[in-house]
Amino acid sequence: MKEQITGNSLRGRRAGRLVGALGLLLALVLLVGIVVPAYAQDDEMPPRIPHYFAGTVSTSNGPVPEGTVVEAFMDGVKNDDTTVTAQSTYELLVTGDYEDDGKIVSFKVGGVQASQTAAWESGALDNNFDLTIASLPDGNPFPFPLPFECFIATAAYGTETAEEINILREFRDVVLLSSSSGAEFVSLYYEISPPIAELISQHEFLRTAVRVGFIDPIVAVLNWSHTLWSEVGE
């Protein structure tokens, strides 16, 4: 009797292990069916990962200003675009498919063709892909409409429509932006002047001091010499 009970117990444990193994196998089958992507079950290829490009953007005269448009093209067809940051950098994700491997990726900065090109590759990371162009359209480093130009003068006069500011705007367009050195000065001014203008606008004393002691004399000189420097743009 004891031997019979022992045999039955052994067979029970074996049956229990078999049921457990079958249960685990069934669970794995179900898990694989859930986890494996549909494209693997249907013999489809997984999607391609974009090619990442990042770096600096510059002309032969120096960095490209913030807001300049950077475009990526694959075999001449536009793929992605972005704008230049305040640090003259950019980032682009150029998407593609299996037939796009090795296609040429080219770039435009402010509508001007960049010197650099690359072969598209799924998942590639080009973290130091610096873009360069000879110059922006018409030699102007600002290929987009400028916001109000003179931040400090605006703060000093309390309005951006003051007649004195118009002469400053004209001098910038006619004289400064007609040369590379002048354009670099304008670019530097836009970089450093906003916080100064913000400080001036908060204090009436500073507004008056800057207007009377700095802006008004400059405007007077520009008005007096207008005939001389206005001919530069003609």
Image (cartoon, rainbow, N blue to C red):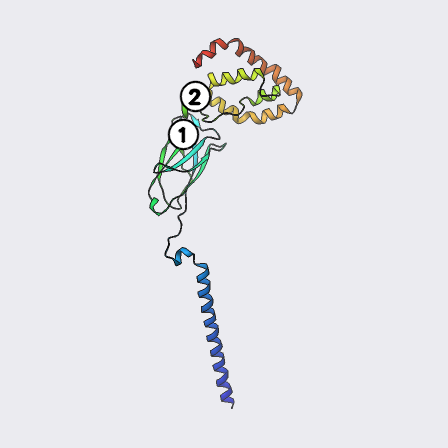
Q: Is residue 127 above or below residue 67?
A: below
Give the structural element (helix, strand or loop) at label 1. Answer: loop
Q: Is residue 147 above or below residue 209?
A: below
Image quadrant for the C terminus? top left
Q: CA distance from mark 1 to mark 2?
A: 19 Å
Q: Is 151 or 56 nearer to us in this picture?
A: 151
Would residue 82 appear left or right of 118 to someone viewing this image?
right
Residue 4 showing in the rendered view: yes
Would you name the residue on which mark 2 appears?
180
Residue 175 showing in the rendered view: no
Image quadrant in which you'd find residue 80 = top left
Q: Amino acid at mark 2?
A: Ser
Would residue 212 appear left or right of 114 to someone viewing this image?
right
Q: Which residue is at 49% across, 84% downward?
A: 8
Would you name the residue on which mark 1 appears?
111
| Rendered location of residue 34, percent (x, y) | 46, 60
Viewer-nearest of labels 1 and 2? Answer: 1
The residue positioned farthest toward the bottom in the image shown: 1
Labelled pair 1, 2 in contact (Cβ < 8 Å) = no
Q: Is residue 189 above or below residue 227?
A: below
Would residue 30 appear left or right of 117 to someone viewing this image?
right
Disc 1: CA contacts within 10 A as few (<14), some (14-19) or many (>=20) = some
Give the structural element (helix, strand or loop) at label 2. Answer: helix
Q: Earlier in the sequence, mark 1 or mark 2?
A: 1
| Rendered location of residue 18, percent (x, y) | 46, 75
Disc 2: CA contacts within 10 A as few (<14), some (14-19) or many (>=20) = some
| Rendered location of residue 212, percent (x, y) | 62, 14
Q: Amino acid at mark 1?
A: Gly
Q: Is 142 or 124 nearer to us in this picture?
A: 142
Q: Which residue is at 61% across, 15% downward?
A: 213
